[in-house]
């Protein structure tokens, strides 16, 4: 079963706007990762946030983690057409320390 | 460095045929994974290998077998393909970059995927 669930499933915005996508998970975690997948390609790691961190930045990406609500958000500021992709959160698998479970993803379309 | 490579990129099989998907990584990672991705389902783990010589089942292992040939290579075999195995298959690897990292913090590096159709 999926540990992480992204919301919304799909998002369409104009270039220059900000995009926010959310991830909710079920069990306690010690870190959460976000990945991007361009159409027809493999996933690429974007950022990892640890359970003792509330916010983390990487370029135009801002990730927050609220362990009390079991949720995380990914904000992409000043979006570009090249940000068009699917975004997945990933949490450690409850059954094994080296595995992660991916959510179902948010499909982002940035319109030029 | 090529990262994670997968072959073939595309494959069409008839029901009952067998095939092996190949994966190799050149990052000296201990852990390797096979996922399948279906529309609306995200990625689901088929099998993984925590280190050379070990393999373990993931979420959807039925109908598949794997071999961790050496540290670099991890293959996925479909013995008797079924239409339900039509999917995009991804191989990934992960490994410790920093001494203080625990395995749960390792990022995964993905191959480009194999698009498999079973008729």
Image: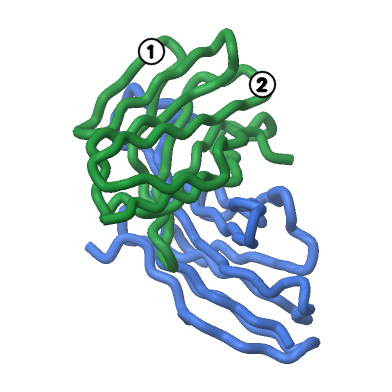
Chain colours: A green, B blue
Report if residue B30 is visible in the image: no
Tell me the crowding category of disc 2: few under 14, some 14 to 19, or many 20 or more residues within 10 angstroms, Cα based. few
Residue appearing at x 23%, y 37% in the figure = A78
Where residue B66 appears, as percent x and y from the top left, is 64, 65
SS assignment at label 1: loop
Instruction: Identify which residue, B30 or A7, lies in the foreground.
Output: A7
SS assignment at label 2: loop
- Tell me how far mark 2 sits from mark 1, CA to CA: 17 Å
Instruction: Identify which residue, A42 or B108, lies in the foreground.
Output: A42
Report if residue B44 is visible in the image: yes
Residue appearing at x 62%, y 17% in the figure = A28
Mark number displayed over residue A53: 1
Where residue A14 appears, as percent x and y from the top left, is 31, 47
Q: Chain of mark 1?
A: A
Q: Quadrant of residue B19?
A: bottom right
Where residue B23 appears, as percent x and y from the top left, is 47, 68
Mark number displayed over residue A27: 2
Instruction: Identify which residue, B23 or B81, lies in the foreground.
Output: B81
Q: Is residue A71 shown above or below B24? A: above
Q: Quadrant of residue B1?
A: bottom left
Quadrant of the image containing the N terminus of chain A: top right
């Amino acid at each position: 079963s999926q540990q992480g669930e992204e919301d919304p499933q799909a998002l369409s915005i104009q270039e220059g706007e900000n995009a926010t996508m959310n991830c909710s998970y079920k069990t306690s975690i010690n870190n959460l990762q976000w990945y991007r997948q361009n159409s027809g390609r493999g996933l690429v790691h974007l950022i990892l946030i640890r359970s003792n961190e509330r916010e983390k930045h990487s370029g135009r990406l801002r990730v927050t983690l609220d362990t009390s609500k079991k949720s995380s958000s990914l904000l992409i500021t000043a979006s570009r057409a090249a940000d068009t992709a699917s975004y997945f959160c990933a949490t450690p698998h409850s059954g094994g320390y080296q595995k992660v479970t991916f959510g179902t993803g948010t499909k982002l379309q940035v319109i030029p | 460095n090529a990262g994670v490579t997968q072959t073939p990129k595309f494959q069409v099989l008839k029901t009952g045929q067998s095939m092996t998907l190949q994966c190799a990584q050149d990052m000296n990672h201990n852990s390797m994974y096979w996922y399948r991705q279906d529309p609306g389902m995200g990625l689901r783990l088929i099998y993984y290998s925590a280190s050379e010589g070990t393999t373990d089942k993931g979420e959807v292992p039925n109908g598949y077998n794997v071999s961790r040939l050496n540290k670099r290579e991890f293959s996925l075999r479909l013995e008797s393909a079924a239409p339900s195995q039509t999917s995009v298959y991804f191989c990934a690897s992960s490994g410790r970059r920093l001494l203080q990292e625990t395995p749960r913090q390792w990022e995964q590096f993905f191959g480009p995927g194999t698009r498999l159709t079973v008729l």
